[in-house]
Amino acid sequence: MTVLIIILALIVLLVAVVLIRTAAFKPPRANPAAAPILAPEPAAEVLGRLSRAISFPTVCTQAYEGTDFGPFEGFIGFLAGAFPLFHKTCELKRINGYALVFCWKGNKTGLKPMILTAHYDVVPVEKGTEAEWQEPGYSGAISGGKVWGRGTLDIKSQLMAHLEAAENLMRRGFQPARDFYFIYGQDEETGGRNGAAKVAEYLDEQGIRPEGVLDEGGMVVSGVLKGVKAPLALIGVAEKGFCNYEMTLSGEGGHSSMPPVHTALGNAARLVTEIEKRPYPAKLTAPVEGMLRNIAGEMGFLVRMAVANLWLFRPLLLRIFSANPVTNSMVRSTFAATMARASDAANVLPQKAAVTVNVRLLPGDTVDAVEGYFRGLAGKVPGAVKGRPGTDISIKTLVPAEASKISPAGGETGPVYEYLEKLIGEFFPNAISSPFLVMGGTDARKYYRVSDQVYRFTPVLVTDAEKNTAHNTNEYITIENYGRMILFYERFIEGFDPSRG
């Protein structure tokens, strides 16, 4: 009886603790009553400059040396003519030929510089889809309140908005307190190894240590998470890593009329099955946990209770997140078998079969650890020669890139984030600002070499469907969004607090 009373008392205590913590938990909320800063509609000449920028097919190929750099030179020349005051005021250094580093000198010494960055390469318009575009993919057409074409959303618009903002400020006689660097890469879509990586190396060699870096990566989005009605202003504070693992299994060759029980390709398929059956362990990283804490107020009492008491409900939340591909990618290093290669003829047994698995790595997980994990799973698949487990497999890592560091999000350790969040609140008062883990790769990761405060945010308000036009058919940006971008960057440059240097 005494034991039962103790158990009941502990249960009551547990419930009380959970409820008290839930009641005390106060996630941030949107402020729809506040009046947002409204940007004027861009003038015709401003839209014309964006339209012209989109017309340059600056497509960087995977084989960098095979890139046609004619459009890149054309684009660089166009910028010089389009923004004469900016080019007169700023020193330009070209790194590795096509990466552009502009420096606008500040009027105070001893302050760390700030970097605004973007990229001007674009992905190609997929062959065979040209007729599906409402406006041609490199037209820069202005119609229906939108500017159309590759780079409108990813991300020449950001570059152009930077320069429009700076040119406007220069016309008014403004000079920043600290140096501002405007950096534009030429190969972000293919990994940034020849652009941003070389620029970061240059900055490091010159001893340039910026206060912070602001790149693309997050936006203000609506309709992304079920149950969240308010728009989310997602500030990327980290990004997943990536690696392709090519796994080759050996087998008995010969004529297909006398096959072994398992061919090399069959064993490769069995290995893929093992990998899909055994996903990597799920976990909450700091950016995802921060996002959960910020949006919990929008998702009802039960979710708020779970987030307020992660010490108790973390395993349950991870199970819930794991059930959906979108949220699963937020809490797990994901595995996707994407390619296979074996025999060249239908009646020939393959002596080797290869499969490629694309992995997106959470911060804290590593390329080497995942390779070890795959080797362990390979041990469960009999080798094709003499049936020896795991002896006839080789694993090659292709284009490995570890997950990025995690930038501070708020407080005294993150003044750039704090200022960015304040400005977002003024332009998007009905949105909830939140740290965010970027699923893809950006140039931003390269700049951790010189700064700990690296953030990814573009000030546009988009639906989930609009966001997905990037890299897709009918990419566009609304004129309203573009005007807002220009004013946002004006305020960012004008208002960044020099006392934080």
Image (tube, grey):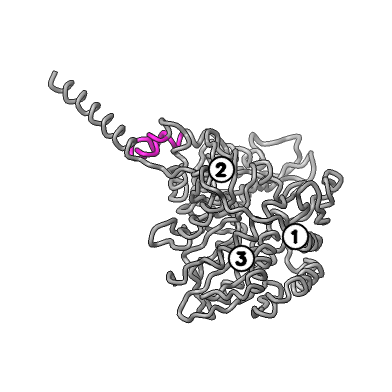
* Left or right for 88, reference 107: right
In three-dimensional space, the C-alpha distance between marks 2 and 3, rounded to whole angstroms, equals 25 Å
Image disc number at residue 340: none
Residue 246 image offset from top left, x and y in percent:
62, 51
Q: Residue furthest left?
A: 2
Q: Identify the residue at image location x=49%, y=43%.
A: 30
Instruction: Determine which residue is flagged by label 2.
Output: 231
* Left or right for 71, reference 290: right
Instruction: Determine which residue is flagged by label 3.
Output: 117
Secondary structure beneath label 2: loop
Q: Identify the residue at image location x=52%, y=42%.
A: 32
* Left or right for 28, reference 12: right
Q: Residues within 10 Å of mark 3 (few under 14, many from 20)?
A: many
**Which quadrant of the rendered structure holds the C terminus?**
bottom left
Q: Nearer the viewer, residue 165 or 206?
A: 165
State which region is magenta: 304-319
Q: Residues within 10 Å of mark 1 (few under 14, many from 20)?
A: few
Give above or below for 342 relative to 416: above
The amino acid sitting under disc 3 is Thr
Q: Identify the residue at image location x=55%, y=74%.
A: 176
Tell me the chief SS of the magenta region. helix
In three-dimensional space, the C-alpha distance between marks 2 and 1, rounded to whole angstroms, equals 28 Å
Residue 61 image offset from top left, x and y in percent:
75, 61
